[in-house]
Amino acid sequence: MSGTFQIRGGKRLHGEITPQGAKNEALQILCAVLLTDEEVRIKNIPDIHDVNRLIEILGDFGVKVTKNGQGDFTFKADQVNFDYIKSNEFKKDGAKLRGSIMLMGPMLARYGEAYMPTPGGDKIGRRRLDTHFQGLVELGAEFNYDEDEYFYSLKAKELRGKFILLEEASVTGTANIVMAAALAKGKTRIYNAACEPYLQQLCKMLNRMGANISGIGSNLLTIEGVDYLRGTEHTMLPDMVEIGSWIGLAAMTKSEITIKNVNWNQLGVIPNTFRKLGIELEQSNDDIFIPAQENYKIQKFIDGSILTISDAPWPGFTPDLLSIILVVATQAKGSLLVHQKMFESRLFFVDKLIDMGAQIILCDPHRATVIGMNQETPLRGTTMVSPDIRAGNALLIAALSAEGKSIIHNIEQIDRGYENIDGRLKAIGADIERI
Ligand SMILES: CC(=O)N[C@H]1[C@@H](OP(=O)(O)OP(=O)(O)OC[C@H]2O[C@@H](n3ccc(=O)[nH]c3=O)[C@H](O)[C@@H]2O)O[C@H](CO)[C@@H](O)[C@@H]1O
Ligand SMILES: C=C(OP(=O)(O)O)C(=O)O
């Protein structure tokens, strides 16, 4: 366990927040630098653990990494070192995050071989990789899994485009296959492709590098393979999960917060999903203004039944914000069913909220019913351990709204995804210390 936050809750916050660059976009984009021997300059890279680890892996793999300024790096993969990729060191490094799996597609396409330990990331239920490997095998790769070492390898003399129907619209799986197909011979079509904004960003960047990808934003991508990709520049979108977290924080703590430059057009159903909880938020140019609200009332379905908020592949509601929705509902007026369809172990953190006084019934590992307390009885501060990145942030929001002192251990989980979270919270008036 590493790192602890001490929080004295119950304070109203006030001010402006600028969201960090998107974690899950950064992980895709950083892997794509392997696709060219020319320089790729990337801006608005968030300074968070997962991303920094991936940058270190690229450096250890031999990619030249130059820091131009805060969040601004240039990468040049003109020489790489496969000794590292086959080493025990990489078996440890690659296993520390989920995003490292997306090194496989580019490695395979560019060098004809790819290796990867079972990746890490959140422990939120089974996280299979079948879609990734099915796609890469269909393009012509030979697949091997060393069960003793938990080590995957792929080899291909040549990748050949074809029609691929994905079993599920996996985000990182689609990214992997798109990157491999960009340098394959001939035409690849990927149906049931994930189409979230970060994947769109990846495809647009690949096109700027000389790839030929159409159907961007839809679930049918067509990729005409090319022989060579060149360097480019790319800027990350703001992190939509972080934006949702700030909305939730504002509501729970009755605070007035403005979230700057959110790229509203890329937020999909996120703003309206928070509005369904009764949270007022206004679009002002490209900012979101959340006024201080004494309380907020959960809507019902048109037939009067209890509202359900569930996750779905984009353009559905992202599973990464359901923990935030859940915590915010604990202080709303009314009831909500939270249905986490994608991950099967992501709701267990509700026990901590129950300890804090929240009214929640965990129906099964996928569903929790929340009976909101209408800000009449505040949560009570307590000591807790952050189980995963988003639950960790949900507990942080709970602690900031709670009466009294809270201690959150294992904040390494929060630091994986949120840049300087304590510094930014302090700047808007929160009482939080890293101890
Ligand atoms: C590094 C990264 O980018 N991580 C994100 C990425 O993970 P990742 O790419 O690992 O997630 P996947 O999209 O592969 O799938 C997530 C889960 O949903 C299930 N599934 C997926 C698609 C589908 O149509 N049906 C279905 O049931 C999968 O079996 C899996 O359990 O996308 C997830 C889903 O948005 C996010 O939670 C993660 O934050
Ligand atoms: C599940 C997440 O991350 P990862 O896929 O990196 O574990 C997340 O960002 O919420």
Image: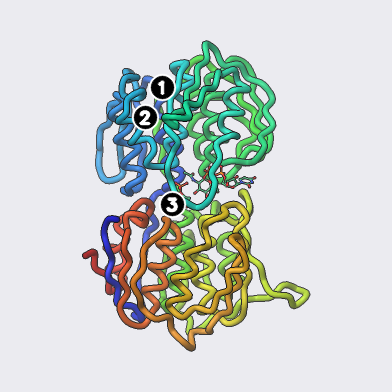
Q: Are marks 2 and 3 in contact (CB under 8 Å)?
A: no
Dot 1 lies on which element? loop
Mark 1 or mark 3: whose residue is earlier in sequence: 1
Residue hosting label 2: 40
Residue 329 percent across, percent down from the top left: 54, 74
Residue 72 percent across, percent down from the top left: 30, 40
Residue 417 visible: yes
Q: Amino acid at mark 1?
A: Thr
Q: Are marks 1 and 2 in contact (CB under 8 Å)?
A: yes
Q: Which mark is residue 36?
A: 1
Give neighbour class at mark 2: few <14, some 14-19, many 20+ (Cα, 10 Å). Answer: many
Residue 429 visible: no
Residue at x-position 29% and y-position 24%: 62
Give neighbour class at mark 3: few <14, some 14-19, many 20+ (Cα, 10 Å). Answer: many
Q: CA distance from mark 1 to mark 2?
A: 8 Å
Residue at x-position 35% and y-position 48%: 46
Q: Is residue 158 positioned above or below 124 on the image?
A: above
Q: Is residue 238 positioned above or below 362 on the image?
A: above
Q: Which mark is residue 115?
A: none
Residue at x-position 48% and y-position 62%: 244
State the residue in front, 397 or 257.
397
Q: Is 103 left, or right, of 275 in this rendering?
A: left
Q: Quadrant of the C terminus?
A: bottom left
Q: Quadrant of the N terminus?
A: bottom left
Q: Determine whether the beta carbon of the residue marked 3 sits less than 8 angstroms from the nearest atom of ligand 2.
A: no
Q: Amino acid at mark 2?
A: Val
Give neighbour class at mark 1: few <14, some 14-19, many 20+ (Cα, 10 Å). Answer: many
Q: CA distance from mark 2 to mark 3?
A: 20 Å
